[in-house]
Amino acid sequence: MSTKEVEKKSNGGNPFQRLNQQLADIAPGLDPIIMTIGEPRHEPPSYVVEVLEENKDGFRKYPAIRGTDEFRAAIGKWLTNRFNLSEDLDPDKSIIPLNGSREGLVFGCICARDYLQKDSKPAVILPNPFYHSYGAGAHIAGADEILLPEPADGVLPDLDAIDPSLLDRTVAFYFASPANPQGTVAPMEYWQKLIKLARKHNFMLFADECYSEIYRQTPPTGILEAAQSIDGTLKNVVTFNSLSKRSNLPGARCGFAAGDPDFIQFFANFRNLAAPQVPMPIQALAVRAFGDEEHVIENRRLYNEKYDAAEEMLSPLFGPVRKDGGFFLWLDVSRWGSSTLVAEKLWREVGVKALPGSYIASDMPDGSNPGENYIRLALVGTLESSKESFRRILDSLE
Ligand SMILES: Cc1ncc(COP(=O)(O)O)c(C=O)c1O
C-alpha cells in the first residue's frame, strides 16, 4: 500500500484530518480562527506545577491499575457531592483511573463484550452524530454498530422505538450527556428509562459525562444518581469523566470510570494486562482538582459569556443557539449548502475553520447523514475571538 493509501484508510475516521485534507489547497480568506477541535483553552488551575513538583517521586514507580487510595477517595467524594449519591458508592470497588475518558470508552467496549458473553453477534448502540472513539470501541469489539440519531436537534432519541431483539444482543450502549455536538442534556426520567432497559436486556450503559461540568444554568443529572434512584445500585451503568473539560487539562490525560462494581473489577483485570496506568503525580493533580470547584465555576462563567454573545449575534440569523451543556455551537447551515460546502466557504471567505457536521456523523442505512445540515463550532477561544468569528460568519452568510 502506498503512503497516500495508508493515510486515506487510517484518516477516514478522524474528522479533523479529513477536514485538513479537504482544505489543504484553499487559502484562508482572513487570519485563521480555528474552531474545530474541542480542546479547552481557558487557563488550567494555578497549582498544576506545584502538585507535580511535590509528587515527582511518583514518576519513579509503576502505578497500580486501580489508582491510589487518595485518588479513588477524592473521585468518590466528588461524585457523591456533585450527584447526591448515597453512601453505597464504594470508591475502592466502583472507581478506576483512566488516561482520559477516551481510552476507557474504547477499552470498555471490548470488556462489555467479554463480560456479558452474549450468544448472538454483539451489537453496540451509539448516538449519531457521535464522538468518534465510540465507533472505534464497537469496531475493536467486532460488534455491529447501530446508530441512534436525535429525531430533531435537541430531541432525545425515542427509546421505545428500539427493537427489543436488538437490545438483547447489545453489549454496550453509549450515551453522552451533555451530548457532543448538540449540547442536549438527558433529564432524570430519560436516564431512568435507559437504565431500566440496560438491566432488562443486560447491556452495559456507558455514560460519557466528560462535559457534565460545562453547563449554562442547571447541573446536568448524572447516570449514577439516576441508577441509585431506581434501586440503590449501580448495576449495568458506568460513567466516564475526566480533567480535560472540567479543569482545562486535556494534556494531563487523566480521567476515571465509575459504576457497576462487578464490571469495574472485570475492567480492572483487563486493563491490568492491556491498558496504561495513570502516573501517580497526575493522580495527585486529579485529587487536588476534583477537590476544587472554584476554577470550574470560573470556567463555566467564561463559556457562558461566549454563549451570551453567540445568542445575541447569531440568533437573528439562526434562531436560538444557546445549548444546555457542553461548549459547542451546532448551527443549521442547510440554507447555504451542505456542511462540507459551508465549512469550505467559511474558510475560503473569512478564515473561520468549522467542523462539518457530516464528518462527525455516519450515514444511516437510508443514506441520510444527521450531521449533513450542520457545522460545529468549539467555543474554546477567547470572548473576543469568538465574537470576531461570529461577525465573520455573518459577513459570509448574510
Ligand atoms: C464527547 C467526548 N467524549 C470523550 C472525549 C475524550 O476526552 P478525554 O479523553 O480528554 O477525557 C471527548 C473529547 O473531546 C469528547 O468530546
Image (cartoon, helix red, strand yellow):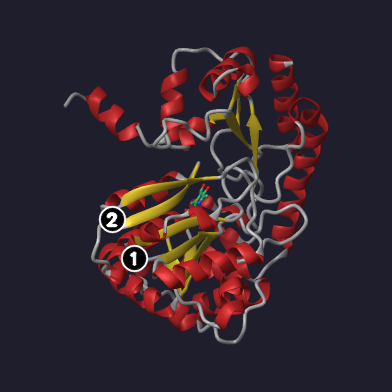
State the SS at label 2: loop
Q: Is any part of residue 55 visible from this angle?
A: no
**Residue denoted by label 1:** 112
- Picture disc at residue 168: none
Decide: few, some or many residues near mark 1? Use Cα within 10 Å; few <14, some 14-19, many ≥20.
Answer: many
Q: How many marks?
A: 2
State the SS at label 1: helix
**Residue denoted by label 2:** 141
**Most foreground residue, 55 or 359:** 359
**Most foreground residue, 209 or 186:** 186
Q: Quadrant of the N terminus?
A: top left
Q: Is mark 2 within 8 Å of ligand 1?
A: no
At 55% from the left edge and 25% from the top edge, which residue is drawn? 339
Q: Is mark 1 within 8 Å of ligand 1?
A: no
Q: Quadrant of the C terminus?
A: top right
**Most foreground residue, 362 or 261:** 362
Is the residue 393 above or below the residue 380 in the image?
Answer: above
**Three-letter amino acid code at the position of disc 2:** Ala
Q: Do the residues under discs 1 and 2 have CB atoms within 8 angstroms?
A: yes
Q: Earlier in the sequence, mark 1 or mark 2?
A: 1
